[in-house]
Amino acid sequence: MRVGAGQRYGWHGWDDYAPFYDWENARTLGRRDVRFWVDLTRRVDGPVLELGCGTGRLSVPVARVAPRFVGIDRSAPMLRRLKKRLRRARIGRGPVLVRGDIRKLPFRKRCRFSLVMAPYGMLQSLLRDTDLTATLKAVAAVLSRGGIFGIDLVPDLPRWKEYRRHVALRGRMSGGRHVTLIESVRQDRRRHLTIFDEEFIERRGRQRAVHRFSLAFRTLTVPQVTNHLERTGFRIDAVLGDYGGDEWVPEADVWMILARRR
């Protein structure tokens, strides 16, 4: 599936991405943000909600230390993989997984979280201002007073060079499968979108399968997001330039925002 100029939403493609998500991220992002979220969870010492929990790259380590953990994602295939991962991890406090829309969080009014996480680029899958505003309002409604909303943005999307059919990754997956990722990148400057056209070629013996889909992400700047947050009733606690706590500068490799519900 290709995301054209008329594409309105950013969740398309993630169901198809589910079998390859962990394999690719282990070779790109890895675990460099895990300690940040685990330490933040320990500090708030209360219920945690992860937006776009996916296959659980962060969910499992955070759920180990959270008094209560809830993950929400729109993709059923992603959530199925996370359920298997949680069973293997044998986490005793019963993490709760919800399939749902982050713009309309399906929780009762008495359900409150001390921390809501929007990890690496999660909010950038919201391709319209109206969707971002709806999500921030939904988060404000489920955060405890004084609770923290943590946002991690991908800073280099608009600087991503356009290219066609580049062999981005090669390697082995479980079950003796060999996988090649052929990637194309397009920029929709008018709509501030970066679109990744992905082709995963999977080989096992003489069998060959090709999986094609597209993922779209919106460029969001730190000033844009902080302004949105303040208009929605949040107070900005910190803007960080790395996962160790250094202050943010526009050239930083990491754009982290910590906001508190007033």
Image: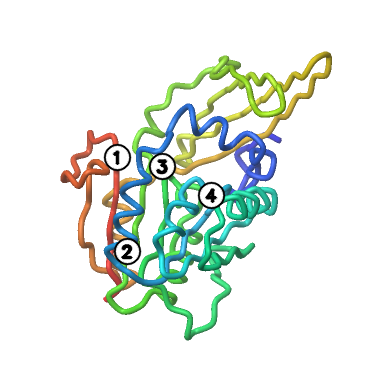
Relative to 171, does residue 27 appear above or below in the rendering?
A: below
Residue linked to disc 3: 219
Q: Nearer the viewer, mark 4 or mark 1?
A: 4
Q: Earlier in the sequence, mark 4 or mark 1?
A: 4
Residue at the (32%, 63%) spot, across then down = 229
- Give above or below for 109 relative to 233: below
Name the residue carrying label 2.
229
- Give the left or right position of residue 4, taking residue 109 as reference: right
Q: CA distance from mark 2 to mark 4?
A: 26 Å
Three-letter code for the amino acid on which mark 1 is drawn? Val
Q: CA distance from mark 4 to mark 3?
A: 24 Å
Q: Secondary structure at mark 3?
A: loop
Quadrant holding the N terminus: top right
**C-alpha separation, residue under disc 4 versus residue under disc 1:** 21 Å
The residue that disc 1 covers is 254
Q: Identity of the amino acid at label 2?
A: Leu
Q: What amino acid type should be assigned to the residue bearing mark 3?
A: Thr
Specify the farthest residue to the bottom: 110
Going by the numbered disc 4, the residue's amino acid type is Gly
Dividing the picture into quarters, in which one does residue 67 lie? bottom left
Kindly indicate whether the residue at mark 3 contacts the one at mark 2 (C-beta within 8 angstroms): no
Residue 59 is tagged as none
